[in-house]
Image (tube, rainbow, N blue to C red):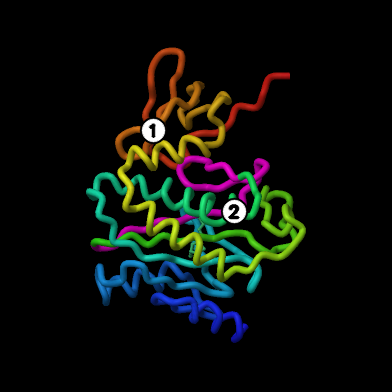
Amino acid sequence: MAANRKNFELMGGHIEWYDSIGSTNDRACEIVRTEGAQAHGWIVGAEEQTEGRGRKGASWISEPGKGLTFSLVLSPLWEREHWGWLSLAAALAVCEGGLLPCGLAPLIKWPNDVLVEGRKICGILIETIADCAVIGIGLNVNERGFPPELEAVSMFQLLGVETGREPLMGAIRDKLMNLIHLEEPLIAEHAWDLLAWKDREVETASGERGRIRGFGENAELKVETPGRLITLSDPEGIRLVPPAR
Ligand code: BTN
């Protein structure tokens, strides 16, 4: 554990790496409270989280020392009303920085889950605090398996070999720090290429069925139904309609 910690902290940049912590997002928010926008680019990571948090109050559980769990503080230059793009940018950073170079074929389930072969490999929790956003990333890396009900998968299960978590984190961090300097239409273009469920029928939370057509001004999802074009901003807003038998 201690060796792992040292490797991460030697990577350069401001990195706090814990053997065990409640939630890396909570610690990153604390840092923002004391450092403000100076904390842009700082990272808090951990071998183990005892109170890892997911979206909508869910918890995020990952096997100590196997997954990659870290939070990156950003002070984006984008107008605040466009920070919705951070979700897609973060998912893109995981795909383009981490998974595609390893030969995997990730897709982004809007707004920011990352799937491979239909199973979740990465979850992202974004929290805004003062002028900063905390991007919390949980990536399944060297886990041997998951309970079937989680419908999750790790890089190890797909590749058959372990992946070093330090270079992976560095590549994701560098990619995300670059992506947030792009104009939003470019993020949209990249994200559209990797978007899951594009050609499939989806159902909105209110029961309307349609097809995904693109993104709105703040990265909302546009779904075309027979009667109208719907703009969804609720992350839990769609599900895939199973193909008719
Ligand atoms: C989700 O899919 O619901 C989002 C999961 C986000 C988990 C990461 S792990 C690092 C960071 N710290 C947390 O407490 N949560 C995020």
Residue in front for this viewpoint, 20 or 37: 37
| Residue type of the residue flagged with mark 2 | Pro
Callout 1 secondary element: strand
For the stretch drawn in magenta, what is the main secondary structure? strand
Q: Which residue is mark 1?
A: 215
Q: Is residue 180 shown in magenta?
A: no
Which comes sooner in the sequence, label 2 or label 1?
Answer: 2
The residue that label 2 is drawn on is 101
Would you call the spot at circle 1 few (<14 residues within 10 Å), some (14-19), or many (20 or more)?
A: many
User: Along the horizontal axis of the image, is 159 left or right of 164?
Assistant: right
Q: Secondary structure at mark 2?
A: helix
Q: Which residues are magenta?
A: 106-130
Query: Which quadrant, please, contains the N terminus?
Result: bottom right
* Pointers 2 and 1 in contact (C-beta within 8 Å): no
Residue 242 shown left or right of residue 21 in the figure: right
The stretch drawn in magenta includes residue 109: yes
At horizontal 52% and vertical 39% (from top left) the residue drawn is 194
Residue 182 place in picture, x, y as percent = 33, 48
Residue at the location (33% across, 59% down)? 133
Measuring from the top left, give residue 230's x and y in whole percent.
38, 25
**Quarter of the image where the C terminus is located:** top right
- Give, as a three-letter code, the residue at label 1: Phe
Crowding near pointer 2: few (<14 within 10 Å), some, many (20+)? few
The answer to whether residue 159 is left or right of residue 38 is right
Q: Considering depth in this image, is 54 or 178 the residue closer to the camera?
A: 178
Q: Please report the residue visible at 38 percent of the width from the left and 56 percent of the height from the top.
A: 178
